[in-house]
Image: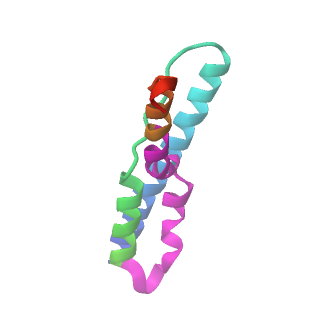
Amino acid sequence: MLILSIVFLLVAICIASMNIAGCIVAYRRRQKGIEGGYSNIPILSLLLCGLAWLTGREYLKLWMFIPALVDPGTWALIALPFFLAWNLLKRQPASRR
C-alpha cells in the first residue's frame, strides 16, 4: 500500500506543478500582451492527495496534502464563489444596487 500511496502522491505533485507552470506561462503571456489564460485542473490534486493519505496514512502522515495546498487549482475552488459574486455585482446597473 505504501507504493500505491507514493504513486498517488507523485501524480498529485505532477498535476500541481503543471498548474503552477500554466499560471506562470499565462502571466508571462499577459505581460507580452497576448490574450488568453490558463484553465487549472481544480480538484484532481486534492483528490489524489486524499487517496495517497488513505492508502498510506500510517506511514506518510498529513504532509501528503502539501501538493494540494500549493496547487493554484485548489485555491481557485476557494476563490470561485467570491469571483462569481464580484462579477455579478459589477454587471448590475448602479440603480439596482
Image x and y of residue 28, in percent: 64, 25
Question: Residue 89, image x and y in percent?
Answer: 48, 33
**Which residue is drawn at the image coordinates 47% and 52% (left, top)?**
78
Residue that sits furthest to the front in the current view: 95
Q: Position of residue 65 (x, y in %)?
A: 49, 67
State the residue at coordinates (52%, 47%): 72
Q: Is residue 26 left or right of residue 57?
A: right
Q: Is residue 86 magenta?
A: no
Q: Residue at x 45, y 26 (%)?
A: 92
Is 90 placed above or below 50 here?
A: above
> What residue span does the magenta drawing correspond to?
56-83
Among the 4 quarters of the image, the one containing residue 4? bottom left
Q: How many marks?
A: 0
Quick one: which residue is furthest to the bottom in this view?
58
63 vs 91, nearest the viewer: 91
Q: In the rendered image of this protein, does residue 38 appear above or below residue 34?
A: below
Q: Nearer the viewer, residue 68 or 59?
A: 68
Measuring from the top left, give residue 83's x and y in whole percent: 49, 39
Main SS category, magenta section: helix
